[in-house]
Image (spheres, rainbow, N blue to C red):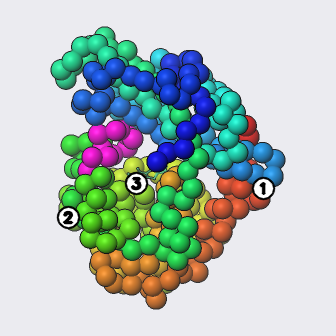
Amino acid sequence: MIDKTEKIWMDGELVAWDDAKVHVLTHTMHYGLGIFEGIRCYETSEGPAIFRLKEHVDRLFKSAKIFLLDIPYTKEQIEEAIIKTVDVNGMKECYIRPLVYIGYGAMGLYPKGNPVRVSIAVWPWGTYLGDEGLEKGIRVKTSSFIRNHVNSNMSHGKVCGYYVNSQLAKKEAISCGYDEALLLDTEGFVSEGSGENIFIARGGRLKTTPLTSILEGITRDSMITIAGDEGIGIVEERFTRDEVYVSDEAFFTGTAAEVTPIRELDGRPVGDGKPGGITRRLQDIFFGIVRGENKRYKEWLTPI
Ligand SMILES: Cc1ncc(COP(=O)(O)O)c(C=O)c1O
């Protein structure tokens, strides 16, 4: 159960958590066309700081462009509203969920004239795949559900309806006793997790899926930059599930999942079944950055 905070930003107003309600005929609730972001704010020695706020707000606007939604605010206004919502709730560390949705008005698939509404909620959220998962790695199952075809749903937009496919995969993985799902694309190549991007390491080099059938993850982008700065070779190239089976290391990245080692895929241990050296090194650097201890990437943090 989610822990309540005090206020939620709704269409320019801060309203009490329990009053943040919408009509049951809200269009997005019926047809799934809404866009959102998942952002984290971390505690640092200089106070709370939001990780890569600008990039997340940029992605929100890119999603809006793809799905032809007119956000009735500027990027700067949304950034300010996010900072204000974290601040007013007195959060030291939290997850931030901006949502842009089509409100009440016309029904049917062409909601001409319905208002485009925006909400921003924040709440405390610990590790998404568990503390043990972060430490020892998780067990993953290749899903029987296929990632949406690139022309059935736009994978570069973070759209609500996309996550029906993710939930099918996640439910299947959990019901089979695994922690997370790995989805393949329509051609059978590895795509991404239900809410994460994937990296593998072989012979000291990293590989991650190209930006074809996946969400353009901001943590993924951070990993590519960090790996480059650390002199670790990295390529964006398609790979198959059996390449994961025989890789030395694998890990998921995402705002919720952060950097989570994968210790097993489909009953096969990845490497020796423990988080590998590259994964650990990148994980340590990542947590140093988000906690404000690594000054090299301080422009990635927006202080509250
Ligand atoms: C489907 C999917 N892929 C990848 C990611 C990782 O993206 P990010 O690192 O920007 O959170 C997410 C999470 O937002 C996601 O939902």
Q: Earlier in the sequence, mark 2 or mark 1?
A: 2
Inter-mark Cα distance, 1 to 3: 28 Å
Residue type, label 1: Lys
Q: Which residue is mark 3?
A: 195
Q: Which mark is residue 295?
A: 1
The secondary structure type at the circle numbered 3 is loop
- Looking at the image, residue 295 sits to the left or right of residue 203; the answer is right
Question: What are the residue bounds of the magenta stretch?
Answer: 155-165
- Looking at the image, residue 1 sits to the left or right of residue 147; the answer is right
Density class for disc 1 (Cα within 10 Å; few <14, some 14-19, many ≥20) is few
* 15 w.r.t. 251: above or below: above
- From where the camera sits, is residue 58 visible? no
Density class for disc 3 (Cα within 10 Å; few <14, some 14-19, many ≥20) is many
Residue 237, x across and y down, in percent: 38, 65
* Residue lying at 57% horizontally and 18% vertically, measured from the top left: 13
Residue type, label 2: Ser
Q: Earlier in the sequence, mark 2 or mark 3?
A: 2
Q: Residue furthest right?
A: 46
Q: Check contact, mark 2 vs mark 1: CB within 8 A.
A: no
- Looking at the image, residue 110 sits to the left or right of residue 283; the answer is left
Density class for disc 2 (Cα within 10 Å; few <14, some 14-19, many ≥20) is some
* Residue lying at 39% horizontally and 74% vertically, measured from the top left: 139
**Residue 164, magenta (yes or no):** yes
